[in-house]
């Protein structure tokens, strides 16, 4: 697991260009796509080269889990990390899973706003 501190650091670590404008996407959907782009770079950087093998039912794939919290600035807080092995759910994007529980906790706790931006669209 690689600990990164910012979206910019994740983009640099993965060789991705700075956040794109997505100007060809309708304005009401733009934030969602920008957050997906950021989250995939963050996940890739934290995983430091590891990629999920969805053909391996024994391999754990960890995800951060959030819940609604009206006292939090974003309205959501990171709760825990969970894993799946062979099931794919719409909420568990293949590119947004982590190699380990610690990596999922780190991503969820440090980049809550980005993940919430995906949840809220």
Image: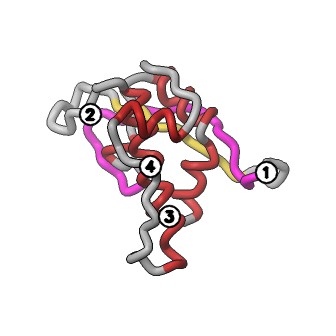
Residue in the foreground of this view, choosing between 106 and 25: 25
* Residue 52: mark: 2
Q: Which of marks 4 and 3 is nearer the N terminus?
A: 4
Residue in the foreground of this view, choosing between 79 and 73: 73
- Position of residue 99 relative to residue 64, above or below, is above
Res. 15 image quadrant: top left
Whole-angstrom CA distance, mark 2 to mark 3, is: 23 Å
Q: Name the residue under label 1.
A: 73
| Mark in the foreground, 4 or 2 | 4
| Residue for point 79% across, 48% down | 72
Res. 117 image quadrant: bottom right
| Residue for point 38% across, 77% down | 24
Provide the secondary structure element on which disc 2 rests: loop
| Mark in the foreground, 4 or 3 | 4
**Circles 4 and 1: CB distance less than 8 Å?**
no
Identify the magenta region: 73-91
Q: Which of marks 3 and 1 is nearer the N terminus?
A: 3
Q: Name the residue under label 3.
A: 32
| Mark in the foreground, 2 or 1 | 1
Provide the secondary structure element on which disc 3 rests: helix
Quadrant (top left, top right, bottom left, bottom right) of the N terminus = top left
Provide the secondary structure element on which disc 1 rests: loop
Q: Which of marks 2 and 3 is nearer the N terminus?
A: 3
């Amino acid at each position: 697991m690689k600990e990164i501190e910012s979206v910019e650091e994740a983009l640099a670590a993965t060789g991705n260009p700075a956040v794109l404008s997505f100007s060809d996407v309708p304005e009401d959907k733009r934030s969602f796509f920008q957050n997906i782009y950021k989250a995939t770079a963050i996940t890739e950087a934290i995983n430091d080269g590891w990629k999920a093998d969805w053909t391996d039912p024994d391999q754990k794939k960890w995800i951060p889990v959030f819940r609604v919290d009206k006292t939090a600035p974003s309205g959501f807080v990171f709760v825990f990390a969970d894993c799946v092995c062979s099931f794919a759910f719409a909420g568990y994007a293949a590119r947004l899973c982590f190699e380990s529980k610690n990596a999922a906790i780190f991503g969820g706790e440090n980049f809550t706003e980005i993940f919430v931006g995906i949840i809220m669209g």
